[in-house]
Image: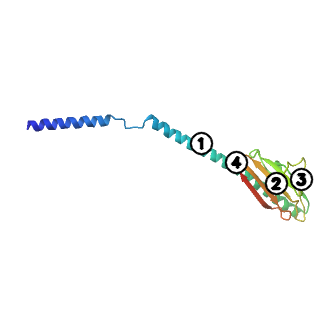
Amino acid sequence: MTHCKSITKTLQTTLNTRRGVSHSCATGFTLLEIIVAMTLTMMIIGIATVSISGVRAEDKLRRAAAMIETTARQNMLQALNSQQTVRMELSAGAFGATDEFSGMLQVRRYGETAFRKPRRGEAWEFTPSGICEPIEVRISGPAGQIEIGFDPLTGCAKRKSIQVNG
């Protein structure tokens, strides 16, 4: 029996030693694993930030185009209701653009071959008969450019071309 007790004690000592060895191993993450995880996280955050800023720039460009379309329709209705010619200055400020949109406005009138910056004092006329001058407008910004052609009979956008960068 003493022999059994000594074998049992030896076995328990061996098991405890092995357990102790297994418990003494580090069970956390290594420094390398933490660095790799942080690097991947920062890359994902960086890509998301760039994507979001591109979407916001494109949204500003689309809002500026929508503002031009809305202003044209409002001027057409005002000319019809008041039975007077409405002249709208062709500049970024005339369309309600703010400093938020720092794009460039260009126009092309009927018969012109290329877009150009509006001349000082240049206006777009809407007549009481419901006709406006045919005109095309290009808005350029960091996100791309939008070209809008306006129908002379309705003053509404009849053709749009959108080119987005990236």
* Residue 103 higher or lower than 129, as above or below: above
Q: In the visual, does 19 lie left or right of 127?
A: left
Q: Residues within 10 Å of mark 2 (few under 14, many from 20)?
A: many
Please provide percent x and percent y for residue 67: 77, 54
- CB of mark 1 within 8 Å of CB of mark 4? no
Gap between marks 1 and 3 measured at Cα: 44 Å
Q: Which mark is residue 70?
A: none
For disc 2, the marked residue is 137
- Which residue in the protein does label 1 denote? 46
Amino acid type for the residue under numbered disc 2:
Val
- Quadrant in the rendering for residue 158: bottom right
Looking at the image, which residue sits at the far left?
1
Q: Earlier in the sequence, mark 2 or mark 1?
A: 1
> What residue would you read off at disc 3?
123
Q: Which residue is mark 4?
A: 57
Q: Residue at x 85, y 61 (%)?
A: 76
Helix, strand or loop under label 3? strand
Do the CB atoms of the residues marked 3 and 2 lie less than 8 Å apart? no
Mark found first going from the N terminus, 3 or 2: 3
Q: Amino acid at mark 4?
A: Ala
4 or 2: tag closer to the N-terminus: 4
Label 1 or label 4, whichever comes before in sequence order: 1
Q: Are marks 2 and 1 in contact (CB under 8 Å)?
A: no
Q: Nearer the viewer, residue 155 or 34?
A: 34
Of pointers 1 and 3, the one earlier in the residue sequence: 1
Residue 87 x/y as whole percent: 89, 55
Residue at 43 percent across and 36 percent down: it is 30
Three-letter residue code for mark 1: Gly
Q: Nearer the viewer, residue 125 or 20?
A: 20
Q: CA distance from mark 3 to mark 2?
A: 13 Å
Crowding near the residue tagged with mark 1, few <14, some 14–19, many ≥20 C-alpha atoms within 10 Å: few
